[in-house]
Image (cartoon, rainbow, N blue to C red):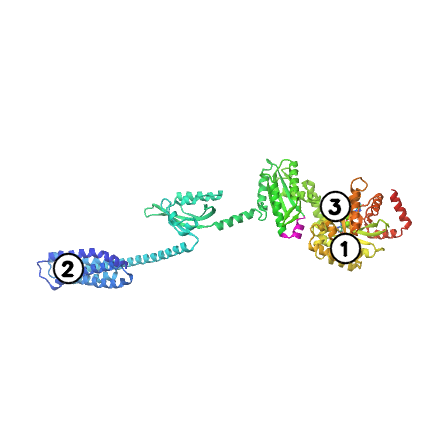
Amino acid sequence: MQQINLLSHLLNVMAVAGTNTVAVLAFGFWNRPLRLATIAGYVSVPLAYSAIVYTARVWRNQHRPAHRALQFVRRYNILTACLGVSWTSLLVGLASVANPPERSLLFSIEVAAISTPVLVAPASAALAFWLPVTIGAFASVSNLDWPLNLITSVCLFGYAALTLMCLLYLNKNFIDRVLNEITLKDQSDVIRLLLRDFEESSSDWLWETDDELRLNHVSARLAEVSLTTVERLRGRSMLKLLTRASPGKGDNEALLTLTHRLADRAPFRDLVIPLMVGREERWWSLTGKPMFDDRGRFTGYRGVGSDVTTAKKSEQRIAYLARYDSLTDLPNRVLFGEALHQACARCRDQEIALLSLDLDEFKSINDSFGHATGDALLIAVAERLRGCMRHGDIAARLGGDEFAIIMAADRAAEVSAFARRVIERLSQPYRLDGRLVEIGASIGATLAPCDGTSPTVLLRNADLALYRAKADGRRTWRFFEPRMDDAVQERRSLQADLRHAVDRNELRLDFQPIIDLATLQVSAAEALVRWQHPQRGMLISSDFIRIAEEAGLIFQIGAWVLREACKQAASWPLPAKVAVNLSPMQFRDPSLAQTVEKALAASRLPASRLELEITESVFLEPSEQTIGSLHRLRNGGVRIALDDFGTGYSSLSYIRSFPLNKIKIDRGFINDLGTGNDASAIVRAIIGLAESMGMVTTAEGVETEEQAAALRSYGCTQGQGFYFSRPIPGEDLVMYMESHRNLSKQDIRSRIARAQAA
Ligand code: C2E
Ligand code: MG
Ligand code: MG
């Protein structure tokens, strides 16, 4: 079709040139005899040109429909063939009457006619013309004299062959080019379709600016994300649209980069630009390429854009979560680590304190109220902690109920005051889900640079100090001291040894008699565990029970104590009760009641002879499991005694809610008896309360005869302490029991009288 188009345009010129030549020939040969061929040529050449020009016009006027192209090619072929034959007839006719110079003229016209088809396309039409004029040329050459006819024929042949080859070559080239154009057009059609589809269906948009960076192609999607209309955007400066607002330092840099790129007419890719659309902060990702015209002049930018707000926000959230605690919004361990590094780097110029803070008994809150309340408590704690912070100081949550604080401080007194304030603030009750929850906090503090300058050392120091604060009774704070480190090493090595103590049979039981204050008979004996350490010698319970609890070894040790105590008690000469201490941790073991029952069954000791000593902390937010175990034991006939009464949380409500058999008054009160303070009033009140509830009372730590006498006069049921006996090995206890059994009533009476007189 391209060829027909080209031909239809060239034909007018060719027709004028051809008809003009015919006129010149008619004028030149007007006085020569007319041959039929000549007449036919004079008539048919202009006619053929007219027909061809007419056909070309028809073709053009018909808007060159593709499906009719073949029909037109066929028509052209016939007409060009007719034209060729007409020229041949005219030239051959004239040649027969021409003199030699005229022949030369005719010969040059024949050569021109042979070469004309090179300009004609398609190849079929060119050949249809070339063939008759070439034959005609050879026919007219044959009229020449020998050897001129041969020489001219050879030259003509070479020339005709060259014309034929050029004709075919140019046509092929033409066809290739047209084919390329067709492919290109197809491709651009596909691309146009794809782009339209992209604009209609994708969340991205295409944009284009003029050379002054004003938008000239605005897609509906771009208008939509800009909360405006296509018309309003068209002609607007691209940069103005983007610089509406740009919060954040890093993001401003992207905008700056874009401005530079646009100014440099450089391409850019995936530049994420922040901007305010309405009142909302959004992010657009832009890719653009400058466009230049044929002369290399900048004509504008073209590119794609997409709204990446969602991705950007999740990216920011992820970055935030990597450095902040999602529950409390405090900095997390990562950010805190960085801050500590920076603080350490500056600590020689600016002294700092690192505080490790841990909530007391947080686990029991979690266990008793559930994790939701635990979380709510942590959020409230973080809020209060934030309220205590000074500007520039940092509080972070390192995990669980662990917090840490970095503060600028050059005096320990300043840190002390801060720690006290924090503990007081955090210890005030919290109202969570309609109930009041209380929790304490302990703090360990270390100072830099005097205690150390590296984050690792400072963190360890603060943890050691925190450990000490916890050991010293919680709700308090301690400063790091170098000897704390030694104590920790010591504890670690003891812990390692304790793991094998049960297997290596290194544990022993001592028993401390509990004496009936009225009869002075042994009514019970408390089993106290001892550890025969291979290097350190005999260790008493207070040396290792807490270590056993920390290492989780208390379950194994507790079970051994129960078995051993029951076994020994079963062989005593008296039906005295055996008191066994239970750590609050043992109540976390769901098989506690079973362990007790097994120990009783193995020793055949009646349950009524076993007394379990528990502490007040068991009742601090008791879990269902704890209460369940206690009831099961109680129902099985085991007696429950409340140890160290008065040292713990001093809430009497649990005494009412759980039926205890005995209260053991802490030795702190007994120590203070007779010193003139309130101790005797308190002891009497406890005894009165226990009596009213049908409970037995045991006074612990009775060291003097006077204390024993006073307690007896208050109505205390039993006494235990060095005055009666120190803790003694099992065999000695048997002897002790024997000797007490043999005390005559007279002995007892005189002892009591002696005590009362004293
Ligand atoms: P506790 O149950 O209050 O045991 C009494 C502690 O007071 C014993 O210390 C005993 O030696 C000491 N003591 C007794 N009379 C006097 C006195 O007149 N004056 C003074 N100053 N102290 C006296 P021990 O053996 O070091 O036991 C300490 C704590 O270790 C016990 O306190 C008990 O809570 C715990 N414990 C002992 N044996 C076990 C055990 O087998 N399991 C568990 N879980 N804890 C145990
Ligand atoms: Mg005890
Ligand atoms: Mg006690």
Q: Position of residue 499 (x, y in %)?
A: 71, 52
Does any atom of ligand 1 lie closer than 8 Å to the CB of label 1?
Answer: no
Magenta: predominant secondary structure element?
helix
Magenta stretch?
A: 361-371
- Report whether 147 appears left or right of 442: left
* Structural distance between the alpha carbons of marks 3 and 1: 25 Å
What quarter of the picture does the N terminus occupy? bottom left
Circle 2 sits in a helix, a strand or a loop, which is it?
helix
Compare residues 80 and 265 and report the one nearer the observer.
265
Residue 647 has which mark? 3
163 falls in the magenta region: no
**Label 2 packing within 10 angstroms: few (<14), some (14-19), many (20+):** few
367 falls in the magenta region: yes
What's the amino acid at mark 1?
Answer: Leu
What's the amino acid at mark 2?
Answer: Leu
Compare residues 106 and 391 and report the one nearer the observer.
391
What quarter of the picture does the C terminus occupy? top right
Circle 3 sits in a helix, a strand or a loop, which is it?
loop
Q: Which circle's residue, 3 or 1, is located before the other in the chain?
A: 1
| Residue found farthest to the right | 746
Tell me which corner region of the image, top left, top right, bottom left or bottom right, holds residue 458: top right
The label nearer to you, 3 versus 1, is: 3
The label nearer to you, 3 versus 2, is: 3
Q: Where is residue 507 in the image (x, y as percent from the top left)?
A: 77, 52
**Label 1 packing within 10 angstroms: few (<14), some (14-19), many (20+):** many
Q: Which circle's residue, 3 or 2, is located before the other in the chain?
A: 2
Residue located beneath label 1 in the image: 562
Residue located beneath label 2 in the image: 148
Q: Where is residue 162 in the image (x, y as percent from the top left)?
A: 23, 58
The label nearer to you, 1 versus 2, is: 1
